[in-house]
Each structure stands twice: as structure tokens, then as C-alpha cells.
Amino acid sequence: MKLANFRRIVAGHLAAALLALAFAVAAAPADKDDKDDKKPAEAAPPSRVSRNAEGETVVKLDEKTQKLIELKTEALVAVDYGSSVVAYGQILDPAPLALLDSELRAGAFSLEISKAQEARARLLFGENDLVSRKALETAQEQLATDEIRLQSSRRRLELEWGPLVSRLDATNRAQLLEKLIAREALLARADLPLVDLPKEKVAAAWFTPLGSDDPLRANTFAPAPSLDPKTQQLGYFLLVTNLEQHAAPAPGSAITARLSIESKAKSGVVIPRSAVIRANSAAWVYTRTGAENFTRRPLALNLSVPAGWFVESGFKPDEQVVTQGSALLLSEELKASGVGGGD
């Protein structure tokens, strides 16, 4: 009896000990969580985005961050651009010009031979009739025919390609054709309605291929000698020979050209292309408004020029525009507004 009671007592104490141990194990993680919950919350970093008195959004970046992202700015320079007219056209295929050049070369060669044969026949006829009059007349007829054929080819060159090409001698024309065929140069034609043709001298011209934002300044240009048979419009031939930094569009590619008239110059600045960013289906530029402050401004893409975009208002000479690092500035704005990104 005593042994049974002893066993019951021992079993009770053992069960109580195991239960206490289980509660201790269960309570340990809860105590850790409580301690973690009692840790003070870290303070959120101050926002880099605010608004100025004009209601514009201002992004603040300290000097260290600016160096880290290699942010660069460029001062705007005052420029005068002549008023311009817009014309539309395409990059020309050099094949027809190459064919006509072959005709001119062959014609010039035939003419030289005809001249030599006529001179020889005339000489021999004058020396005791060593050749017949008929042979002399035949040589003279061939000479006249070759002269007429070559003159006809030259007139075609003038009427179809204008002074921009027809004023070149055979050597320079051949060199131009080699560049055009190798896509190291571009020849384009841009036309506009007769009523819109500039009445004053065109001082500069450039064109932008379809799908590009990079205008090409024409090294030389000249009025087209005749109407385009399809559009019944008149315009200019534009030649670009410095294509080292540009990909040459294929012949037939559509272009938009601008013909500048210096006598009606407008004052403004040119925004560099590297300063332009796009967000919310619009173009923007960040300007430096303080040592650490940058403000985003809208840009109207109305007048594309070789160096960028010409604007008459909204930007002033000597203002600093961001040309590298704009993406981070925009990212800071979007994070502050809770927007994930722009388009």
C-alpha cells in the first residue's frame, strides 16, 4: 500500500514538471516577440521632393548624391534662328542618277572618238582626197549625233536633278555617287505647295527621317528644277555628306524638312537632346534652381534643329539644364507621388 502511494506521488510530480517545462518552452518565443515589438520604429528618411512658391515640384539632391550619379548640367546659350517652313519628301534612290551618269560618261567617250575620227577624215580628205567625201560626211554626221546625244543627257541631268548635281564635273559626280551608293551620304527631296514656297533666300536646311528625333543638316541644297509629277509640288534637293555619327535611312524613307530664312530670325535657346526626358506622354527638362534643387519643366517639341530643340520661351540663356541624371530625378518624383513609373 505504501509502495503504491509512493508511485502515485512520484508520477504526479513528474507530470507537473513536464507541464511546467512545456509552458516554459511555449512562453520563450512570446517573450522574444514582445521585446521585438517594444523596439522603437526607425524614422522614415526625409522626402527629397517639395513644391516651391510657384507650385512647381522641386527635387533636392545633395552634392554627394549628385557626384554619385554623375549628374551633369549645361548652360543654355542665346541663339537666333530664322523662321522656317516645313516641307515633306523622301530619301532619293541613287540608281536613276547612276544610270544617267553612265549615259553621260558613255556619251562623252563616244564624242571624243567621233571628234578624232572626223578630224582624221577631214585631214585625209584635204590631202589629195585620200578618203572619199562620203566618208568625211559620215564622220561629220556621227560627230553631230554624239554631240546632240551628250547635250540631251546633260539637259536631263539639269532638269531632273537641278544645279546641286548638274554643276558637278564628272569626277566629283562620280565621287558623290560612290558615297550615295555606300550610304555614306544622303540625297533627299522635300516639297511643299507653291503658295508656301519661301520668297526669300533659304539660308539653311535640315531634315529628319521618319521615326528619328535626330535632324540632319544639309551640307548643300538647291531648288528643284521642276514640279514633282505625283504631288504637283515644288521644293529643294538636300544633300548630307557627313553621316559618320548617323545611321543612314534607306532610300524611299519619308522625311520632314525645315528650310530656314535668316532674314526673319527669332531669338531663343536650344535645348540639348540629352536634356529631354519623356513622362506622361509629354517632354520635360530638369533645370537647376539651386545648388541642390532641380525643377521639371514642360518642353514643346515644335522646332527640331541639329543641336536639339529651339524654343522662344519657357527657358532663358545661362539657365542650367540637366543633361545626365534626369532619370533619377524623375524617379524621386514618382516615388514621392506613389507612381511606379512614366512612359
Image: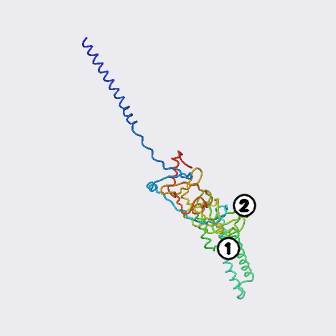
Q: Position of residue 120 (x, y in %)?
A: 68, 83
Q: Which element carries disc 1, helix, strand or loop?
A: helix
Identify which residue, 15 or 140, lies in the foreground: 15
- Residue under circle 1? 107
- Residue at image coords 58%, 50%: 280
Give left or right: position of 37 versus 190.
left
User: Would you call the spot at circle 1 few (<14 residues within 10 Å), some (14-19), or many (20 or more)?
Assistant: many
**How did the renderer colour the structure?**
rainbow
Q: Which element carries disc 2, helix, strand or loop?
A: loop
- Residue under circle 2? 231
Q: Position of residue 66 (x, y in %)?
A: 46, 55
Q: Amino acid at mark 1?
A: Gly
User: Would you call the spot at circle 2 few (<14 residues within 10 Å), some (14-19), or many (20 or more)?
Assistant: few
Q: Amino acid at mark 2?
A: Thr
Q: Is residue 119 above or below residue 105?
A: below
In 3D space, how far apart are the residues under numbered discs 2 and 1 (Cα atoms)? Answer: 32 Å
Asked if marks 2 and 1 touch (Cβ < 8 Å), the reply is no
